[in-house]
């Protein structure tokens, strides 16, 4: 059984120590430790978790030091001298909500004080054969190639990175504020920077933790810390045994944490805490874009529709939402108020949606569009031929996602139109022939087929939804058929280029489908991409302090929030010009 002495120390005069970060693990306290409180007689036996017991034993073996989170130190027994150790499990009354809240406010000070400590230790748990081999490779620089780049060790590190330690929200602050961080796994150790250099580009959690660490270093030279909203957005995948810690664990690393949450209250329900934090972000700080996280909430009939459910955010957030919320703005307008669950905010109506691709819509035989022209238009009238213009606009709308850079691929009009036609020709009588799918471009048949049946099925569903989308008083299918029958073959076309264009188009369609986005046509006769819960007659608004237009649904004199809208880059200029002379009005979203 472990034995030690509990000492009271001041952070202002703290001895040299090591701050230790570890994962509590299961709540089962299946280990014991004997503690003598300094200045008192007798010993008391305290139950601790197996994880803490393992960490303390390894620390004793190495003769290292640590500090606990309550301005007290745990000194080991007579077997090791001049060592200081501690843990919040020993020094904080976890059953006292007031004391827990009080100690949370000190966490940042403790790990900041560790700047004068010898090091910060991240304890991952006992070693395995795989972890030992990985640590040896990292320490021997076996991962560094001659050109300075790093080998892909993502497979070798899968077991290590899957440990619960990296899933814990509290370790973000503990690692971010340490001067020198050493990662321990059993008797093996490696510097945090070396582990991060290899895995930050392949593991989202490592990347997020290191981002906090970089921002913390920058704050010491005058760069402002991130806001609490951004911190919550970057860490929402992390876990905590108490969901309130998803907010409280971030307060010491944010610019506005003390203002948003002056006192961590563990007696208050999690839902009320998250709602209060969100209301302050939107109304007091002007972060209207935070409501984008509530996309799709309207379908669940939850109220208010603008309030995000932080505990149920999807694992993958669309990049345009993350960028819009975290984007730094030179100035903010503070005219937003919240009362009785209703959000009052300034906005400008951009357009009404005339038609939307409905999820699950089934397309039957629509027939072929017929007219008297049987030949493809000459080059002289090519630029004025409307179906070609509209299909090019369709290409621009689809390929603007998920990243704007996709819209600037150097592809001429002819290749864009041919790729769109080929995409819609993949669907034969509303279904793909999955049993005949094969890789590459079929030069004889003049068609391209996806290699994955799953992707093929997704494309089929997406095409069926968009075939009936009306644009300029015709369906998309009619525009495609019209262009297709005017051009009987693709003479002079490069099948390789068409295959690449079609792959690019399918990739963007897949991204849209994954992000719950679909195509719509606005009252200005433009192709836009909107959230899948959007319906006909929904309105597109631009709200103050939110660069991304939103879709709202009128409900009497108020609105309900549906989701976001993204216009192709070709429409961005029109929106900017329109907003210059538009009248901003106060609207209410419930």
Image: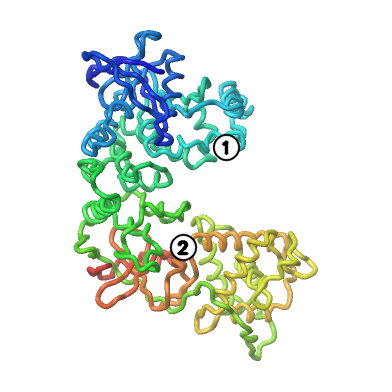
Q: Earlier in the sequence, mark 2 or mark 1?
A: 1
Secondary structure beneath label 2:
helix
In the image, taking residue 337 as reference, residue 441 lies left or right, namely: right
Between label 2 and label 1, give the one nearer the viewer.
Answer: 1
State the residue in front, 454 or 32: 32
Secondary structure beneath label 1:
helix
Residue in the image at 35% along x and 56% along y? 309
Q: Which residue is mark 2?
A: 569
Which of the image's four quarters has the N terminus? Answer: top left
Where 263 falls versus 554 (above or below)? above
Around disc 2, counting alpha carbons within 10 Å, would you say few (fewer than 14), some (14 to 19), or many (20 or more)?
Answer: some
User: At which x and y percent is residue 481?
Assistant: 64, 80
Residue 332 in view, yes or no: no
User: At which x and y percent is residue 280?
Assistant: 23, 52
User: At which x and y percent is residue 58?
Assistant: 46, 19
Label disc, if present, on residue 513 of the rendered structure: none
In the image, taking residue 421 as reference, residue 535 lies left or right, namely: left
User: At which x and y percent is residue 525?
Assistant: 45, 77
Residue in the image at 39% along x and 78% along y? 537
In the image, taking residue 379 as reference, residue 540 lies left or right, namely: left
Farthest residue to the right: give it: 444
State the residue in front, 531 or 414: 531
Label disc, if present, on residue 158 of the rendered structure: 1
Dividing the picture into quarters, in which one does residue 427 lie? bottom right
Where 488 falls versus 98 (above or below)? below
Dividing the picture into quarters, in which one does residue 582 lie? bottom left
Where 32 falls versus 554 (above or below)? above
Dividing the picture into quarters, in which one does residue 410 lie? bottom right
């Amino acid at each position: 059984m472990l034995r030690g002495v509990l000492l009271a120390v001041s952070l202002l005069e703290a001895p040299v120590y090591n701050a230790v970060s570890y994962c509590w693990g299961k709540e089962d306290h299946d280990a014991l430790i004997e503690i003598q409180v300094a200045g008192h007689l007798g010993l008391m036996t305290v139950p601790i978790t197996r994880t803490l017991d393992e960490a303390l034993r390894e620390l004793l073996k190495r003769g290292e030091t640590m500090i606990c989170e309550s301005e007290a130190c745990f000194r080991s027994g007579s077997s090791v001298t001049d060592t200081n150790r501690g843990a919040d499990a020993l020094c904080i009354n976890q059953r006292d909500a007031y004391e827990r809240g009080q100690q949370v406010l000190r966490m940042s000070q403790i790990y900041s004080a560790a700047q004068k400590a010898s090091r910060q230790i991240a304890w991952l748990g006992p070693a395995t054969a795989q972890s030992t081999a990985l640590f040896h490779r990292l320490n021997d620089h076996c991962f560094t190639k001659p050109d300075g780049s790093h080998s892909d060790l993502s497979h070798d590190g899968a077991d290590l990175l899957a440990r619960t330690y990296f899933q814990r929200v509290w370790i973000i602050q503990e690692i971010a504020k340490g001067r020198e961080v050493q990662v321990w796994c059993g008797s093996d150790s490696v510097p945090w920077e070396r582990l991060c250099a290899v895995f930050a580009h392949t593991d989202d959690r490592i990347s997020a933790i290191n981002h906090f660490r970089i921002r913390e270093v920058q704050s010491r030279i005058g760069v402002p810390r991130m806001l609490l909203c951004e911190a919550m957005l970057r860490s929402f995948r992390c876990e905590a045994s108490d969901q309130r810690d998803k907010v409280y664990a971030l307060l010491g690393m944010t610019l506005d944490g003390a203002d948003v949450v002056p006192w961590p209250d563990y007696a208050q329900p999690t839902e009320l805490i998250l709602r209060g934090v969100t209301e302050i972000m939107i109304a007091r700080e002007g972060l209207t874009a935070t409501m984008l996280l509530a996309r799709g909430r309207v379908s669940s009939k939850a109220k208010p529709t603008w309030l995000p459910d932080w505990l149920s955010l999807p694992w993958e957030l669309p990049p345009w939402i993350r960028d819009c919320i975290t984007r730094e703005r030179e100035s903010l307008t503070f005219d937003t108020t919240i009362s009785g669950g209703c959000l009052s905010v300034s906005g400008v109506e951009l357009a009404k949606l005339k038609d939307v691709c409905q999820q699950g819509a089934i397309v039957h035989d629509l027939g072929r569009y017929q007219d008297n022209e049987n030949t493809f238009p000459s080059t002289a009238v090519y630029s004025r031929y409307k179906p070609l213009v509209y299909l090019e606009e369709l290409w621009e709308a689809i390929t603007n996602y998920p990243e704007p850079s996709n819209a600037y691929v150097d592809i001429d009009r002819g290749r864009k139109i041919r790729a769109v036609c080929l995409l819609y020709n993949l669907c034969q009588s509303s279904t793909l022939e999955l049993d005949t799918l094969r890789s590459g471009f079929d030069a004889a048949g003049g068609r391209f087929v996806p290699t994955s049946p799953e992707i093929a099925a997704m494309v089929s569903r997406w095409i069926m939804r968009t075939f009936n989308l009306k644009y300029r008083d015709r369906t998309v299918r009619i525009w495609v058929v019209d262009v297709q029958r005017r051009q009987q073959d693709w003479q002079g076309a490069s099948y390789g280029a068409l295959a690449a264009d079609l792959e690019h188009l399918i990739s963007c369609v897949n991204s849209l489908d994954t992000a719950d986005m679909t195509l719509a046509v606005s009252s200005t006769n433009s192709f836009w991409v909107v959230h899948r819960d959007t319906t006909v007659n929904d309105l597109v608004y631009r709200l103050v302090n939110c660069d991304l237009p939103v879709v709202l649904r009128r409900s009497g004199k108020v609105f309900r929030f549906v989701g976001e809208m993204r216009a192709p880059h070709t429409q961005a200029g029109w929106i900017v010009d329109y907003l210059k002379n538009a009248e901003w009005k106060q609207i209410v979203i419930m």
